[in-house]
Amino acid sequence: MTDLNLEHWWQPFTNVRAFQKNPRVFTRAEGSFLFREDGGDVLDITAGLWCCNIGHARREVADAVRDQLMQLDYAPPFQFGTPPAFQFATRLMAHTPEGINRIFFTNSGSEAVDTALKIAHLYQFARGKGSKTRFISRQQGYHGVNIGGTSMQGLPTNRHGFPLLQEVDFLPGMLDISRNAFSRGCPEHGTDRMTDAFEQIIALRGADSICAVIIEPISGAGGMVPPPQGYLQKVRELCDEHDILLIFDEVITGFGRTGSAFAATEFGVTPDIMTSAKAINGGTVPMGGVFVKDSIQQTIFDNTPDTVPEFFHGNTYAGTPVAAAAGLAALDIYESEGLFTCASGAKGEHWANTLHAMGDLPQVIDIRNYGLLGAVSFDPLDAPAKSLGPRIHQRCYENGLLCRAVGDHMVMSPPLSISESEIDLFAERFRKSVLEALG
């Protein structure tokens, strides 16, 4: 039991009362491991919260942050600039899809989503399409916690009790265990269902009222669900057909998670706007960004008087030199260690094989994977729905494994720097934990 005072920090997405009765406190991290107060190691199979893709405590990043703090810790981004922000923006463009060469920095994925929605809306207004104000999102989708992102939420518990934008329609979620169970990579079924729903929304609302579609290429907090075959290509086709912008929320899938720098590249589908955050600098300093097609920025610029800001929007810490310095150091690691593509190579294959070997565990009804992402779904049988995941989660922690429970789905996103022997250790600890939790 910790001797810390636990009363004053209201923790995010946490049952605080339960936490205070049974606190779980980390005090150190290194490589693929977090360490508890008692010194016990916990294999971080979630890369923090999908963000520590380069592993923990990378000296190169720490040194870059320290040096930047001592040289220029902060300067206002409104009407001014700093070298690290411009340098990081330039280097990032080597990894974006063709035609996307602009980034608007934010502090988080939530801010990136709301920024993307505002850019999309402003673009439609700038080109004389002011009636295009509605959005299409997806059930089981997660888009952060600000008002715009909350309104796009496809997770009911994250919407309940909060103010919402009303001009949003939802495509069906992609998880279909009855038809797609135990798929490797993209499952077979689901694209036709999405197409029918999309066309029904168009028939109901009219294409001239719809601003943009926002979706995660792979659903994250909704249970780690890869898109069905041809799904993203069909969404792009429908958006083009009906003159609708396509926004990819790549806060989770960006920076090597799928086997390419971005899922847009992995799946060969270029959106108009991409949100990012989390792993943009290895999860070290809060930072996010919105990648935008050059043509969208140019349209806004062309329709704004040259005496005022083109976009009345921004954050105090947008593109802060410290966060950008961390990003430059992280990008060196991503590039030099081949982390952007390792999920599509031998490491990704070993991960997939290891994950699907869990199919013999009791009550497993589905296993799915893509790149260095994975999920194992359990049937709670006679237990209340969504109760089994938390039980397995707690047992994993006790056995030295950090795994995330999303209802009765156990979701994994290991650091891209994880070794094959550490993947084997994951399998050992996960198997032990499941058997104990169900025993």
Image (tube, rainbow, N blue to C red):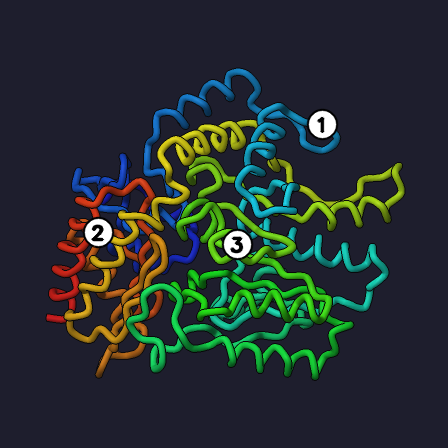
Relative image position of residue 3 (x, y in whole percent): 25, 41
Can you tell which mark lies on residue 80?
Answer: 1
Q: Indicate the quadrant where residue 386 lies.
A: bottom left
Q: Amino acid at mark 1?
A: Phe
Using the numbered discs, state the Cα–Cα distance from disc 2 to disc 3 in whole angstroms. 31 Å
Can you tell which mark lies on residue 128?
Answer: none
Left or right: 406, with 90 as reference point: left
Q: Residue 101, relative to residue 296: is it above or below?
A: above
Q: Amino acid at mark 3?
A: Ala
Q: Which residue is mark 2?
A: 401
- State the residue in front, 259 or 173: 259
Give the mark nearer the N terminus: 2 vs 3: 3
Could you tell me which residue is drawn at 74 percent across and 78 percent down? 206
Q: Amino acid at mark 2?
A: Leu
Q: Residue 426, relative to residue 246: is it above or below?
A: above
Q: Residue 141, relative to residue 146: is it above or below?
A: below
Q: Residue 351, relative to residue 197: is it above or below?
A: above
Q: Look at the numbered discs 1 and 2 and tell me whether their residues touch, using CB distance below 8 Å.
A: no
